[in-house]
Amino acid sequence: MTETETRARIFAAADEMFMQHGYSKVTMEEIASGLGISKKTLYRFFPNKRELLRELMTERQSEFMEHIEVIWKREDLDFVGKFRSTLDFVGERSSKMNKFQDVQKIAPDIWKEIHDFKKEKIFQRVRRLFEAGFETGIFRSDIDRDIVLLVYTHAVESIVNPEALSELPCTAGQAFEAISKIIFEGILTEEGRSKYIFHDAAATTAR
């Protein structure tokens, strides 16, 4: 087995264990044992758990951006299909990243790197998607695009996290799907939407 393959196995095992048990509760010895390798071999690749986490996050971030590029090169999807696939993937990855919540207290510098990546890469990508949606006429032109993006990103950040989810009878994926459904499909039925528009027009005229 090559060193690249061994590193990939270590990343996969650490990723799974960190998400299942939390970063703070997993030891290097447990990771080595789970892989069937010695601690000496593990330490040859990573001097400590902190460095393993940092390199794991860098690897996952790179994979994230590559996956987004693959979605947008797909010729079998129109804009809406690419948009939906991208948001679904962002939601899935965001919910997984939030399982590393204990990193915020134990390794605040690495947590900041994770947060900066979400802010500078993920949400900037989402912003470009929204911009394209407005430019191509997929989204309504009478709605402020900055407010739509702000509502969406804040909803995801506020709800798809361990603390908020503990008060909801659903998983992170289900919460993300509900947020997307509300923002992009609304909560009104066709009949309700017609009545809402009618009352909105009446209120505008009365002014």
Image (tube, rainbow, N blue to C red):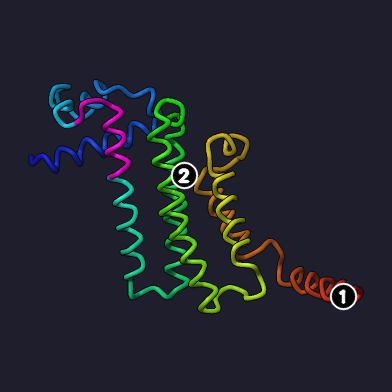
Q: Earlier in the sequence, mark 1 or mark 2?
A: 2
Tell me, yes or no, whether the highlighted magenta stretch contains residue 79: no
Q: Position of residue 18 (x, y in %)?
A: 36, 32
Q: Which residues are magenta?
A: 46-58
- Relative to residue 145, is residue 111 depicted above or below? above
Circle nearer the viewer, 1 or 2: 1
Left or right? Give the position of 200 relative to 7: right
Q: Mark 1 packing: few (<14 Cα in 10 Å), some, or many (20+)?
A: few
Q: Position of residue 45 (x, y in %)?
A: 16, 32
* Amino acid type assigned to the residue bearing label 1 in the image: Ala
Quadrant that contains the N terminus: top left
Majority secondary structure of the magenta segment?
A: helix
Tell me, yes or no, whether the highlighted magenta stretch contains residue 56: yes
Count of residue discs: 2
Circle 1/circle 2 CB separation < 8 Å? no
Residue under the image location 56 percent in, 58 percent down: 180
> On the image, numbered disc 2 is attached to which residue?
95
